[in-house]
Amino acid sequence: MNRTFLHVDMDAFFAAVEQHDHPELQGKPVVVGARPDQRGVVAAASYEAREYGVHSAMPSREAGRKCPHAVFVPVNGKRYREVSRQLFAIFRRFTPFVEPLSVDEAFLDVSGAKRLLGSGVEIARRIKQCTRDECGLTASVGVAPNKFLAKLASDLEKPDGLTVVPRDPVGIRGFLSEMGVGRIWGVGTVTRSLLESAGFRTFGDIQNASEERVAAAVGKRSAKILLRLACGEDSRDIELEHEEKSISHEYTFPEDCTSAEQVQKMLCDLVEEVGCRLRAAGRYAARAHLKLRWQGFQTITRRRSLARPACDDFTLRSAALAMLANEELARPVRLVGFGVSGLGSTSGQMTLFAAEDERVCKQERLSRAMDDLRSQFGREAVRSGAVEKKKGQRDEG
């Protein structure tokens, strides 16, 4: 209870950046993402747009129907990352113990900063003022004795909120007691339904129940976790290093694609994007994943283990195309995706065959060389799949 954590969550981050950069958009409903006449989804919505029921991950066409006068702007990832770096630089002025959760939110452990900078509440106010003065953006902050409570609190008074959780166990239980079980960390639609069917609708209902009764609804292991969280208990510390557990990219076709060749070409492009990120992170993947979404939103995913962890485009593309070849593309394809998981820092044990090891090393070196060329001359400068010869150019073997 002597620890003090903040959870800082920027308000409607992407949309707020657009409104800051383009003052004519301030006060207007802004939707960041695909246009309403295009296939795609909403990446972010300003609070003015949210009043009409628009939210992230909603199809853009539906957002356009709900709020026809909204201003739709494309995602500007480079600009958002730039502002994110400014924000995290502000956070680190107050404490080195910063755990990023995304580009626009983080946990901060300010326990050791209170002697110099004041209480957790005072630090939270200063951070909010800095983000407003230096970035023109508002943040909502939760102040609490642990991470779970801090994150929960930051969401209670959005936008531009500051919520302080009591520090004593009795005060914490009272603070939580009337909140719905859907706010408990890790409780999704299925678990929430199980809990509510068993009569657990609020934190207080779980606080006052026996472990056996909760276990009858969700199982013994989940019951132990829920009972601790319902009482506001969380022993997690700040994680200073976050390693990606998976890397993926996907593409939604403007119109449902009926060409197997076009689907294959797009899949190869996605493999290159994933491979480039994998190599930049210094990681090797043990598994490859394929995702296909058909007309009508039916979606399938396929997974294939690699013979040895790899990061080169050649190995990844071979796995991707092998998975695709096993699927009958009899219906128009709406979306194709590729990803990798089982990430590690090495490519695993060397084989008994030196020639095989050398081949893998060459493929990795070539893939990294192509990364360098693309960074200098653009993605279309070189393709790892097939190199087109100029007219009249002879193959020298």
Image (cartoon, rainbow, N blue to C red):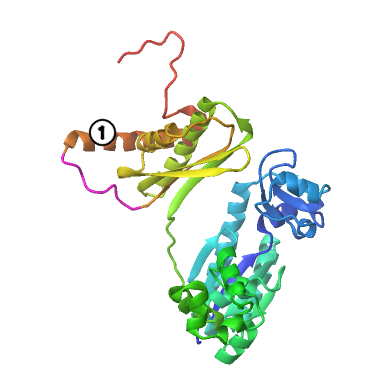
Could you tell me if residue 95 is visible in this image? no
Q: x%, y% of residue 52?
A: 80, 57
Q: x%, y% of residue 179?
A: 65, 78
The image quadrant where one finds the C terminus is top left
Could you tell me if residue 253 is visible in this image? yes
Along the horizontal axis of the image, is 235 left or right of 348?
Answer: right
With respect to residue 175, does 394 lie above or below?
above
To which quarter of the image does residue 121 belong?
A: bottom right
Query: Could you say whether the residue bearing mark 1 is in a helix, strand or loop?
Result: helix
Q: Residues within 10 Å of mark 1 (few under 14, many from 20)?
A: few
With respect to residue 336, does 14 lie above or below?
below
Residue lying furthest top in this view?
392
Q: x%, y% of residue 4?
A: 53, 81
Q: Residue at x 55, y 90 (%)?
A: 169
Magenta residues, dominant SS class: loop
Amino acid type, callout 1: Arg
Along the horizontal axis of the image, is 103 left or right of 60?
Answer: left
Residue designated by label 1: 359
With respect to residue 60, does 363 lie above or below?
above
Q: Which residues are magenta?
A: 344-352
335 or 117, which is in the foreground?
A: 335
116 or 1, which is in the foreground?
A: 1
